[in-house]
Image (spheres, rainbow, N blue to C red):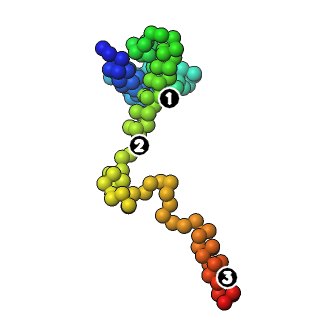
Amino acid sequence: MDYSLRLIVAVLATWRITHLLANEDGPADLVARFRLRLGSGLAGQLMDCFKCLSLWVALPIALFVTRRPLELLLTWVALSGAACLLERLGQEPIVIEQITKPEEEKDLGMLRTETNGYQEHAANESARHHTTSV
């Protein structure tokens, strides 16, 4: 398997295993019972945090992608980061209207369609100054 394919498989495996352990009950509730047995201690808290758990799941999977120490370190955190991004994508609702709206109607987030009040105040001051000086 070439590097790119190993990396893609590793990202998907990291996400899937982490998601199973952190968010699912598993087959025959095995994962749920395992989490219950761990309790509220450090290991139990680790199982409740997707981001924390993804770091530990990614470590052995990173060995599948690379063997060099520096690459291993970078691959480890990259796999965890990719798994976190996939998890976040799964939680974000896709708003079809935002995709299908004409470009001029889209809400681009940072661009405001309303004034902040300063522009209106400046226009009023300009108009007041213009009428008093005439």
**CA distance separating discs 1 and 2:** 16 Å
Counting residues from the start of the chain, the first of labels 1 and 3 encountered is: 1
| Pointer 2 local density, CA inside 10 Å: few below 14, some 14–19, many at least 20 | few
> Which disc is residue 51 wearing?
1
The residue drawn where x is 40% and y is 38% is 89
Q: Which residue is mark 2?
A: 92
Count the marks: 3
The circle on residue 129 is: 3
Q: Are marks 1 and 2 in contact (CB under 8 Å)?
A: no
Specify few, some or many for label 1: CA neighbours under 10 Å numbering under 14, 14-19, or 20 or more.
Answer: some
Q: Residue at x 59, y 70 (%)?
A: 119
Identify which residue is drawn at 35% across, 23% down.
8
> In this rendering, does residue 77 appear at all?
yes
**Residue 12 screen position, x and y as percent:** 36, 25
Q: Quadrant of residue 67?
A: top left
Element type at mark 1:
helix
Q: Which amino acid type is shown beneath numbered disc 3?
A: His
Q: Nearer the viewer, mark 3 or mark 2?
A: 3
Q: Callout 1, which amino acid? A: Lys
> Residue type at mark 2?
Glu
